[in-house]
Every structure is written in C-alpha cells, then in structure tokens.
Image (spheres, grey):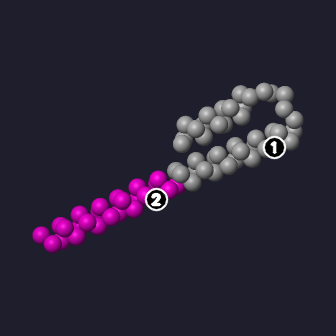
C-alpha cells in the first residue's frame, strides 16, 4: 500500500512536464489525498501499538499482583 502511494507520487512528478494548469490541480488533489491516506495509516498503526502496549502492561501488573 505504502509503496503504491509513493509510486503514485513519483508518477505524478515524473510524468510529462507539459500539462495544463487544470491537470496540475487534479494531480495536486491526488497528491494531497495520498498524503492524507499515509498519515491516517501511520496514526492508526501508532494507536494500535499504544493500545497493545497498555494492554500488555496491565496484564503484567495484574499477574504480578496476583502472585
């Protein structure tokens, strides 16, 4: 997914330099969407990791207290 998004960005920048302003606007929107998608994925991953760490910590503390 990430590689595809990066490839999309590169395709937009590498593709023909002689495009009209409207085409450039459309491509800019695509770039913004791709960046937003990447940011959302990163945020979701970070949240999941934090939740897992907290759950593991709680389980460890509870099991230590039960001893």
Tag 1 secondary structure: helix
x then y, percent, for residue 21 = 87, 39
The answer to whether residue 2 is above or below residue 43 is above
Residue in the picture at 86% in, 42% down? 22
Residue in the picture at 64% in, 46% down? 35
Relative placement, left or right, of 12 versus 1 is right
Relative placement, left or right, of 48 versus 59 is right
**Viewer-side residue, 59 vs 3:** 3
x then y, percent, for residue 3 = 55, 37
The answer to whether residue 61 is above or below residue 31 is below
Classify the position of the N terminus by image quarter.
Answer: top right
Is residue 50 shown in magenta?
yes
Magenta span of residues: 43-67
- Badge number at residue 25: 1
x then y, percent, for residue 11 = 68, 32
Q: Residue furthest left?
A: 67
Residue corresponding to mark 2: 47
For the stretch drawn in magenta, the main secondary structure is: helix
x then y, percent, for residue 17 = 80, 27
For the residues labelled 2 and 1, the Cα–Cα distance comes to 33 Å
Q: How many marks?
A: 2
Q: Quadrant of residue 5?
A: top right
Residue in the picture at 84% in, 32% down? 19
Q: Quadrant of residue 56?
A: bottom left
């Amino acid at each position: 997914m990430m590689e595809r998004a990066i490839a999309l960005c590169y395709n937009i920048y590498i593709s023909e330099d002689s495009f009209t302003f409207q085409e450039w606007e459309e491509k800019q929107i695509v770039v913004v969407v791709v960046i937003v998608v990447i940011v959302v994925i990163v945020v979701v991953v970070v949240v999941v990791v934090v939740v897992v760490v907290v759950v593991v910590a709680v389980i460890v503390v509870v099991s230590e207290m039960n001893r």
